[in-house]
Amino acid sequence: MLSLSRQFWVLIHRWAGLTIALFLIVAGATGVLLPFEKDLRTMVERLMFDVQAPLPGARPLDAIVLADLVERQTGGKVLFLPLSVPADRIMSFSVGPVDTNHPLPFDMVWSDPYTGTVKLKFRSGVLADGPQNIVPFIYRLHYSLAAGDWGIAAFGVAALVWTVDCFVGFYLTLPMRKKTEPKRRAGKSWWARWKPAWKIRKGVRGHKLNFDLHRAGGLWLWPFLFVFAWTSVGFNLPSVHRPVMSVLGASDDMPPTGTREHLLEPPIGLPAAREMARSLMQTEAEKRHFTIEDEGYIFYDQDHGLYRYSAHTSLDPADDVAQTGLWLSAVDGKLSRFESPTDGTMADKTMNWMYMLHMAHVFGLPYKILVSLTGGMVTILSLTGVLIWMKKRSAKRQRGRGTASPA
């Protein structure tokens, strides 16, 4: 039986890396673009539809009015509604069926913000439905290989393996002390022996360059790699992530209990729900001493009979994401739960920051560029890991045939 020696962890690192290499190559390559996802979607919307005010000084219609017009034209139900209406591009809606027995052939709708006229109906992320789906398709590749629920689960398992392998890989960069070596090598400190692991040697090529890139790149990017790995588990494999974070002190992030039954048509409609949510948010702002800067979105959770309303407030650390939110009952309009990005346990705050770092929602353009570069490095680390394995495998076969040199 193989003991927990360094060689054991080398094998674990090798096979873990090979197992998840495809996932990390895809996630890294697509992650180069996704920090700019919002900008890319906006660019596509403007290129496909030229939106202009019908009269000088005209203002877009209210979001709720637009949602009502979309529902009348499509026969569907708006499920997710951004409350800030753009004046220079189309308005995007997430739409679901009114009757689950009669699904719609689309789930996204674009409409003119001034008239509410539907311009386009399509399935999000399906390339066959048009070029507007290029960016959503890249996003689906990033977290699920565009393979639906199976891909999400597979990516979650890969992220869990990646999380563990982060620690294994870090351990393998530490200087190794031979049994015959004294505990402290004369004239050379522990840091002096570890320092070369952080560097790429000058003039090296081929296998040595791949090895240095893999080891040094992994060390310098280690905090980011761990953040991306563990948050990916949270996104894709919550059944594992939640219990672990609960042990560490995190609170329950599931929606609060609503009606306990599937409520397709809520007694309280969108217009009334928004007004109730605004009032509840204002009450919380006065009680908790924060200011409301802008509305974010409102969506209806049919499974719990609840509305989720968000606003951008002075509590939000994110640049352009409305993180302060509340849940209210779709039956009686009562507050079910208020959610603040600055409240909760230390584990809650830590995970909130990790999610924002993963999504590049903080520190503006410089951090987005850094995340984009990190995505490229994740791909490089995975590729160099595969190349290192191939080189060692080839050398092992040559030794087996007796053709390898003594060196």
Image: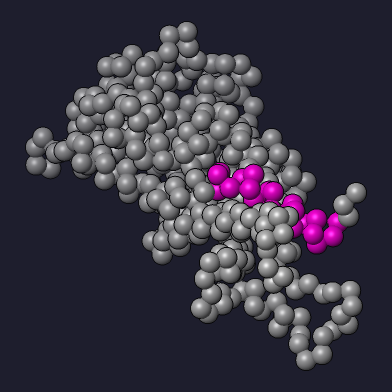
Corner quadrant of residue 127 = top left
At which x and y percent is residue 237? 64, 37
At which x and y percent is residue 380? 51, 58
Which residue is painted at 45% across and 50% down in the image? Answer: 29
Q: Is residue 168 above or below residue 208?
A: above
At which x and y percent is residue 350? 63, 55
Which residue is painted at 61% across and 45% down in the image? Answer: 20
At which x and y percent is residue 104? 38, 15
Q: Determine if residue 193 is in view.
A: yes
Q: Which residues are magenta?
A: 4-24
Towards the viewer: 291 or 10: 10
Q: Is residue 155 above or below residue 111?
A: below
Which residue is painted at 73% across and 55% down in the image? Answer: 400
Towards the viewer: 100 or 404: 404
Residue 144 counted in the magenta span:
no
Towards the viewer: 306 or 219: 219
